Image: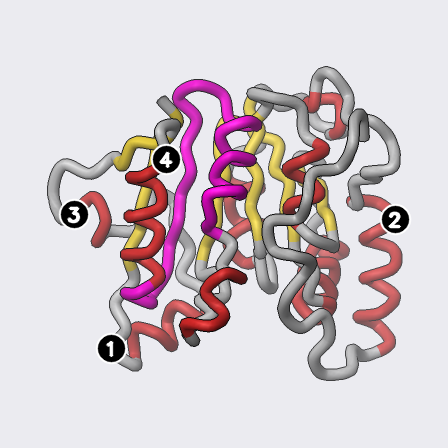
Amino acid sequence: MNGERRERSTEGFFGRRHGKTIRPFQAAALAAGLERYRIDLEKPAPGDLRTLFPAEVSKLRLEIGFGGGEHLRHAAADDPDTGFIGVEPFVNGLAKMMVALDRQPLANLRIYDDDATRVLDWLPPASLDGIDLFYPDPWPKRRHWKRRFVSPANLDRFARVLKPGGSFRFASDIDDYVNWTLLHCRAHPAFEWQARDADDWRLPYETWVRTRYEAKAIRENRIPAYLTFVKT
């Protein structure tokens, strides 16, 4: 990476990296998958990020915290003209993703398995068409709010790497975090909320895939919100 690495807005990575012990076949898929899909941040980012992908792509999106990869895999399969970069530090989610990719490889997908701010600082300016942050850890206790990924420092990072007109999409079932994100984006000069009526935040995005987490949230009467902000 060129230049001095910016201070981590999250003061380091917060959260679990490991859960249940993965099975041998998952470990094998994880090792092989990271060898094939992982982005090497020790090398400078290419001037044209499209060269990161074996497939020919015309647009680029970043998904931060893809969990088990249900949405990311569907999006990449549904939109082969877009190159997707997915970030997930949680080993169990990565293993699940790599098992699925072993069965159905995707040439328009790359992965990073550590702190997403490192990817954001590595990317060239105005290089992404979109950033997705779906169901991030809400850190519900007030003393932990500083750990939330939506922050002034990370919105600065988003603004730097998004193209003009690029989108930041945020989905959550936690009302407090939804309001937190609305307030932070409203206070940031680079972002404008794209909402004309209630359906613009109540209805899922086009081609949205409901994950098991979201289905559970709805069963428990937690209503998701789907926010879209555009870089002005």
2 vs 1, front mark: 1
Q: What residue would you read off at disc 1? A: 221
Query: In the rendered structure, which disc, 2 or 1, sits on the residue that comes first in sequence?
Result: 2
Query: In the rendered structure, which disc, 4 or 2, sits on the residue that comes first in sequence?
Result: 2
Mark 2 closeness class: few <14, some 14–19, many ≥20 residues within 10 Å:
few
Judge whether residue 185 is colored magenta: no
Disc 2 element: helix
**Residue 199, disc:** 3
Query: In the rendered structure, which disc, 3 or 1, sits on the residue that comes first in sequence?
Result: 3
**Left or right position of 124 against 194:** right
Label 3 and label 1: CA atoms lie apart by 18 Å
Which residue type does callout 1 highlight?
A: Asn
Residue occupying image coordinates x 57% and y 28% = 161
> Is residue 81 visible from the viewing direction of this image?
no
Disc 3 element: helix
Query: In the rendered structure, which disc, 3 or 4, sits on the residue that comes first in sequence?
Result: 4
Which residue type does callout 2 highlight?
A: Glu
- Disc 3 to disc 1: CB gap under 8 Å: no
Range of residues picked out in magenta: 150-176
Judge whether residue 172 is colored magenta: yes
Q: What residue would you read off at disc 4? A: 188
Which residue type does callout 3 highlight?
A: Asp
Q: What residue would you read off at disc 2? A: 35
Mark 4 closeness class: few <14, some 14–19, many ≥20 residues within 10 Å:
some
Query: In the rendered structure, which disc, 2 or 3, sits on the residue that comes first in sequence?
Result: 2
Query: In the rendered structure, which disc, 1 or 4, sits on the residue that comes first in sequence?
Result: 4
3 vs 4, front mark: 4
Label 2 and label 3: CA atoms lie apart by 42 Å
- Disc 1 to disc 4: CB gap under 8 Å: no
4 vs 2, front mark: 4
Query: Quadrant location of the C terminus?
Result: top left
